[in-house]
Image (tube, grey):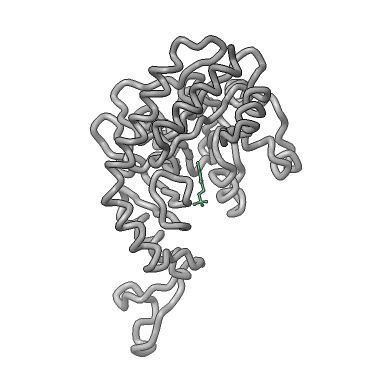
Amino acid sequence: MVTTPMTFVATAATAAQLGAEIVFADVEDATANIDPDSVASAITPSTRVVAAVDYAGQPADLDALLPIAHGAGALLLEDAAHSIGSVSRSRPVGSIADLTTFSFFPTKNLTTAEGGAVVSTDPALLERVRRFKLHGLVRDRDLQRHPDEGGWHQEVHEFGLNYRLPDVLAALGSSQLTRLERFKARRAAIFDRYVRELSDLDGIRLPARVDGIDPTWHLFALRVLDGRRREVYTAMRERGILVQVNYIPVYWHPVFEDLGYRRGMCPVAERFYAEELSLPMFADLTDDDQSRVIDALREILS
Ligand SMILES: *Cc1c(COP(=O)(O)O)cnc(C)c1O
């Protein structure tokens, strides 16, 4: 699998657990999304999946990635844990890649407390996903190998696991879905205000926006220049402002170090990591609290 190092470890770990060899392609400097040119260099005929991540909510360059993946006989998987509700050139996330995965963890744009969802543009793939999440059980008699066994019969053709989302959590998700447009609008307003009120501040770089993309912003990923990221992180935390860093390059995790991955492989991602600082960004952030974040950052950097 070819994937990005600028993500939460799960994007690569899930494939590694299934025995995949993970190849990291570098990211674009502007968006921190996987760089199609780097994917084109990394891909081989044995690549089964290219996994992109919509970093901060801004969809990866799927129009460039799809032909590269399909040209090598691989599927394009979009890890849309950050980007539910985002729209790329009039197409909603979930309608473009072969497989799109969503996370509904509480910190994400929409939550079911725990859980997620997979969508696909390919009905056959979707059928495999449905079976996989139900222990691999085949209940449709027309599809069974031994349909005459009896009325009770169900059988397994491919191993699966229990990935069912409990009904109670699905109910929470249905309610959240009706609020998604409001969450998106509030996040956009927070994003725009950060841009407006920080644009004259020296020592930082604001996140780049791609034309034709209408994101549900998940992160406000600022870059702190001049080697001051750690200092700014600590000073903000001391003021009780819960900034974060998203993410250490995935192959820096000891589990990948132990497999022989070394620092320096993806220099653009490593530079991005060295400067990145995520400012508070969630639908319930009040105007007063956002003022505190902006004032604190100005004070620290002045
Ligand atoms: C949160 C997240 C995941 C993992 O989601 P879970 O719901 O915890 O499985 C995967 N990829 C990215 C990019 C994430 O942000």
Q: Is residue 284 left or right of residue 4?
A: left
Quadrant of res 204: top right
Of all residues, the one furthest to the bottom in this rendering is 150
Q: Nearer the viewer, residue 55 or 289?
A: 289
Q: Position of residue 121 (x, y in %)?
A: 30, 48
Q: At 69% across and 35% down in the image, what residue appears?
A: 252
Q: Position of residue 152 (x, y in %)?
A: 38, 88
Q: Nearer the viewer, residue 176 or 73?
A: 176
Quadrant of res 183: top left
Residue 75 visible in the picture? no
In the rendered view of the protein, which quadrant contains the C terminus? top right
Q: Position of residue 202 (x, y in %)?
A: 53, 9
Of all residues, the one furthest to the front in this rendering is 288
Q: At 55% across and 23% down in the image, what residue appears?
A: 296
Query: How many numbered marks appear?
Result: 0
Q: Is residue 139 left or right of residue 261?
A: left
Residue 111 visible in the picture? yes
In the rendered view of the protein, which quadrant contains the N terminus? top right
Q: Nearer the viewer, residue 38 or 194?
A: 194
Q: At 23% across and 32% down in the image, what residue appears?
A: 90
Q: Position of residue 212 (x, y in %)?
A: 28, 24
Q: At 30% across and 51% down in the image, what residue appears?
A: 177
Of all residues, the one furthest to the left in this rendering is 90
Q: Is residue 210 left or right of residue 268?
A: left
